[in-house]
Every structure is written in structure tokens, then in C-alpha cells.
Image (cartoon, rainbow, N blue to C red):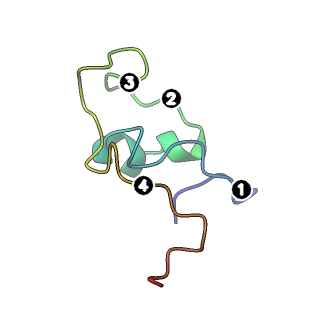
Amino acid sequence: MFGDENDVAHRCLACDSTFRVQNGSAAGLDVGHPDPAENPNRNRGPRVGAPLRADGGGDS
């Protein structure tokens, strides 16, 4: 859904804010909004701390 031309997502909602992801940070673009990696107490994504899902996202 959010990624570069090689279908690689560089960021996700667990490590970045929704605003940044929707404006291209997951595609590797520089977004003019504070980066949570550089400002850890700002703009943390809504899924911070959520368990990672390597099963394709389906409930099992």
C-alpha cells in the first residue's frame, strides 16, 4: 500500500506517523515533518508497540 517502485516499504505505522507515511516516508521520500526516529517523543505511530505480523496480516 505504501512503498517505493520496488514494493519495499521503508517505514510503517509502528515506526512513523500517519501523516508522514501518507505523504511518502514509506516510499523513501523526505517528508517535511518531524521524523520520530530523530524526535522519539513526537509523532509516534498509532501502532507503536503492536506485535509484528509476519503471517500476511490474517487472523489465525
Which of marks 1 and 2 precedes in the sequence?
1
Q: Earlier in the sequence, mark 2 or mark 4?
A: 2
Residue at image location 48% in from the left, 85% down from the top? 60
Mark 4 to mark 3 CA distance (whole Å): 22 Å
To which residue does mark 1 refer?
A: 5
Q: Nearer the viewer, residue 39 or 57?
A: 57
CA gap, disc 3 and disc 1: 22 Å
Placement of 11 over or under 2, stated as above or below: above
Name the residue beneath numbered marker 3.
35
Disc 2 residue type? Asp
Say which of 3 and 43 sits in front: 43
* Residue at left offset 58%, top offset 46%: 27
Q: Is residue 25 left or right of residue 16?
A: right
**How far apart are the alpha carbons under marks 4 and 1?**
27 Å
Mark 2 = which residue? 30
Q: Earlier in the sequence, mark 4 or mark 3?
A: 3
Q: Residue at x 49, y 55 (%)?
A: 52
Measuring from the top left, give residue 40's x and y in whole percent. Answer: 32, 19
Residue 16: x %, y % from top left: 38, 38
